[in-house]
Image (cartoon, rainbow, N blue to C red):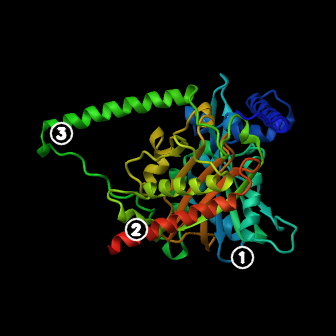
Amino acid sequence: MYQNHKYKASKDHRNMQSHMVESTETRANDPSSSSSSSSLCLCFMGSSAADKFSDEPITPIGGFFLQPQMDQIIHCTMGFKNPIDIAAIKSHLKTSLLLSHPRFSSLMVRSPRGLKQWHRTSHVDLNRHIIVVPNTITTASNFDHEAAVNAYLADLSTSSGLSADKPLWEFHLLMAHNCGVFRIHHALGDGASLMSLFSASFRGAEEEEKLPALGSAGKKRNRVNGEKGWWVLLIGFVGMVWFSLIFVVEFALRSLWVCDRKTEISGGDGVELWPRKLATARFKLQDMKLVKKAVPNATINDVLVGVVSAGLSRYLDHRTPNGLPDGLRITGIAMANLREQPRLQELTDLMKSNSGSSWDLHGFFYRTVCNTSFAISNILGPQEEIAVGGNPVTYLRVNTSSLPHALTMHMVSYVERADMQISVAKDIIPDPEFLAKCFEEALLDMKEAAHCETND
């Protein structure tokens, strides 16, 4: 694995910050603590409205994302059509479904037994959650807004985490670049659940009375029916057991010691602390649908895997003459939504559900991440335009804080486009803009091949 001594101070600072947070939380639960923690104590003891909410334990996977090595924060970037009106955004958030959800108005605390729990507060101070950045990110006279915003997101990816004395989310308003960045801790929810909540909270001005539709995950494959005979069911069952066993064994081996061969894009233990760089690959959903239609039983995810595979091949060939030796295997981690219903959940169920199914996270162990080469996710976003404070959103992009991977990719669809944020450790992959171009050209080549096959 990579050894990196010059970033040791950063790692020590993150661990020290974690200990400080735990100490603050302990004082907050201790009535005899000093007056310096009294403001935090009020959240637990000073309001009868808060007392009616019982503390909820954090799920094991949620606790996993709160560990110092895997402290994951989701960054959701929104571009706005009109200049940002801070007062309108605050007014919208105050009455939105976002703040009605318990996770967005709860503190992460420790019980007397030391267990992490969610504690509901009676009031959320938006002034502490909305961070206004008035000036441009860069001092250069000729700058690109997208590059400046990506540089800001890259810095956030390796910066300190969210403060534990308030609910674990923030909204950064980059006034000079006319965009906002939601910072939401991954322990609050996964991408699919958060996108559902965003879509419900930020409806367009003309769509106030109805919920915007999320993208479809595609038609489900037909299940085997009883008319095909018992032997078809038996073969299907045996195949399911056999392949499940193979996947479980392979996953266990990958978690323990099996790892990818080192390439120009490999990360490793400690790489999550290395400086990051971001680039954006833009795709047209219509192009992806055209490729999907040309391949029987294909999905958009299948097309995305093909784009990534072809794009990485181009990039490795560019970096080294023999970057793709025979037998090379590059393994990635794909974040999957296992819910049967991919569309927006009924809001009453979403807000009242206390089960783990609606807001559960599907995480992987740190060693598994270290032993693979990249991570990728694809989130179905709104098919209709959304707005924040009456200001239409022109684009929607997602990335997360750093992982031990040197390469992570997060794609989200919005209206008729799909943007993929490419986050890299810049000391390993110094040119993510070229990598983004490789992905874009790979889709265009696939589109051309699909078009030729359709005309034949």
* Residue linked to disc 1: 83
- Horizontal side, residue 220 vs residue 358: left or right: left
Identify residue type, mark 3: Val
Residue 212, visible in the rendered structure: no
- Whole-number angstrom distance, CA of label 2 to CA of label 1: 41 Å
* Residue linked to disc 2: 450
Query: Which type of secondary structure does the marked residue at label 1 adopt?
Result: loop
Task: Tell me if mark 2 has few (under 14), some (14-19) or many (20+) residues whose alpha carbon lies within 10 angstroms of its own.
Answer: some
- Whole-number angstrom distance, CA of label 1 to CA of label 3: 61 Å
Q: Quadrant of residue 64?
A: top right
* Residue linked to disc 3: 232
Above-or-below relation of 152 to 142? above
Residue 292, visible in the rendered structure: yes
For the residue pair 336 and 124, the one nearer the viewer reads as 336
Query: Which type of secondary structure does the marked residue at label 2 adopt?
Result: helix
- Whole-number angstrom distance, CA of label 2 to CA of label 3: 33 Å
Q: Earlier in the sequence, mark 2 or mark 1?
A: 1
Question: Residue, x 37% and y 57% (percent of image)?
Answer: 298
Residue 107 in the image, given as x and y percentages of width and height? 67, 41
Q: Quadrant of residue 29?
A: top right
The label nearer to you, 1 versus 3, is 3
For the residue pair 379 and 452, the one nearer the viewer reads as 452
Task: Tell me if mark 1 has few (under 14), some (14-19) or many (20+) residues whose alpha carbon lies within 10 angstroms of its own.
Answer: few
